Amino acid sequence: MSRVKKLIRQEILDLTAYPVPSAEGMIKLDAMENPYIWPAVAREAWADLIKDVPINRYPDASAKMVKDGLREVMSVNENHDILLGNGSDEIIQMLAMAVAKPGATILAPEPGFVMYKMIATFCGLNYVGVPLTSDFELDEAAMLSAIAEHNPELIFLAQPNNPTGNLWDEAIMTKVIEASQGLVILDEAYTAFTEADHLHLLDQYDHVLVMRTLSKVGLAGLRLGLLIGAKDWLGELEKIRMPYNINSLTQASAVFALEHFDMLEMQTEQLRVDRVVLMKDLSQIQGVQVFPSEANFVLVRTPEGMARHWFDGLKERGILIKCLDGGHPLLKNCLRITVGTTDQNERLIQALQDIAVSGSVQ
């Protein structure tokens, strides 16, 4: 043990591993996954394809067919390149590694995606978190002040934001972009659930890149993220990307899914409809504050001191959500709920109503 403490960097020793709770046998509404599976005919066609993938060979290092499919379904301009990662996490890590000079800084609004801070720590960068306003909007003055003070190499702006679910004012976001001397990454992980699209900013600002993922549209198990932007930036990042980081089964599955993307779009459209119903039903539970959402999850604030109590009560009833209380001062008494199927959402609401009325966990 003494050798572990001697060799491992102190900032790593101080970390806690990212927690992923077991969801066996539970209604899983904690991780922003698409709850719908593919139709049987699609699963059969996919299985027929997969059985012929030559897994004894290394995958296509460039994943050209995947990139071609992504370019088509996301309308990516030919002037922009695409870089693929094993989920968005690997892309964030590549970006951090690329700028990890002594004293380099990553800056992001908070509360936000926890991996921005964790990966900054992994890569030995400074991290600056700038609190959002009380209504989860970008604090223009605080952001501009932090940029001027720290001159960050990387700024992450999520549209919509996780865990708050809202879109930020584009005028403020533009001021942040124009104030930055470093790279600005627009994280559009939840783009399938909003009309907002920021690819046009790539043509306006040469220091902006757009990051997306296929995880939220129903392909979380594939772990496929992408970064879109100028060839000069992505060409340098390709030097860091590990060869063969997108395996053969992921590539074959992604190409199949992209060829049948209308199937996934039907599911995400259903989730957008279900989100509206879920938000309405949640707002009718006494004492609950429901925040606007442009994602496939909803942030709610429970009555004072009840977030953990309600989380435990749902878990006792076989429903797993995310308790955010204690994670950030702005998230006091907050829970994050992934939009599930119609039946799952109804069971969640019934359980929450029972917990709210009974005031006990069972």
Image (cartoon, rainbow, N blue to C red):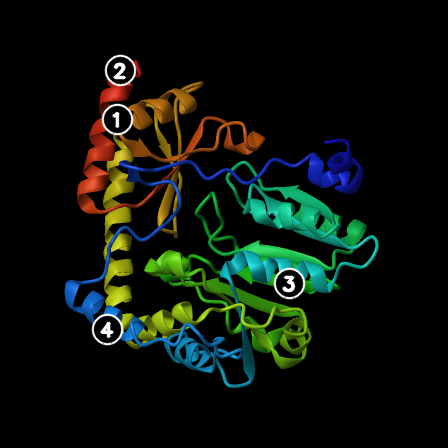
Task: Say whether disc 1 or disc 3 marks the residue closer to the N-terminus.
Answer: 3
The residue indicated by pointer 3 is 94
Above or below, comparing residue 140 to residue 333 in the picture = below
Q: Secondary structure at mark 3?
A: helix
Q: Quadrant of residue 311?
A: top left
Dot 1: within a 10 Å radius of its alpha carbon, few (fewer than 14), some, or many (20 or more) residues?
Answer: some
| Tag 3 near tag 4, CB within 8 Å | no
The residue indicated by pointer 2 is 362
Cα distance in 3D space between marks 1 and 3: 41 Å
Q: Of tags 4 and 2, which is closer to the observer?
A: 4
Q: Secondary structure at mark 4?
A: helix
Q: Tell me the residue at 24%/54% (across/down).
A: 36
Q: Which mark is residue 48?
A: 4
Q: Tell me the residue at 42%/81% (across/down).
A: 65
Query: Could you tell me residue 362's position as x and y percent?
Result: 26, 15
Instruction: Inspect the image, locate mark 3, and give the three-letter code of the amino acid beneath it.
Output: Met
Q: Secondary structure at mark 1?
A: loop
Dot 2: within a 10 Å radius of its alpha carbon, few (fewer than 14), some, or many (20 or more) residues?
Answer: few
Q: Of tags 3 and 4, which is closer to the observer?
A: 4
| Tag 2 near tag 1, CB within 8 Å | yes
Task: Say whether disc 2 or disc 1 marks the residue closer to the N-terminus.
Answer: 1
Task: Say whether disc 1 or disc 4 marks the residue closer to the N-terminus.
Answer: 4
Task: Say whether disc 4 or disc 2 marks the residue closer to the N-terminus.
Answer: 4
Cα distance in 3D space between marks 4 and 2: 47 Å
Above or below, comparing residue 9 to residue 263 in the picture = above
Q: Tell me the residue at 65%/71% (across/down).
A: 237
Cα distance in 3D space between marks 3 and 4: 34 Å
Q: Of tags 1 and 4, which is closer to the observer?
A: 4
Instruction: Inspect the image, locate mark 2, and give the three-letter code of the amino acid beneath it.
Output: Gln
Dot 4: within a 10 Å radius of its alpha carbon, few (fewer than 14), some, or many (20 or more) residues?
Answer: few
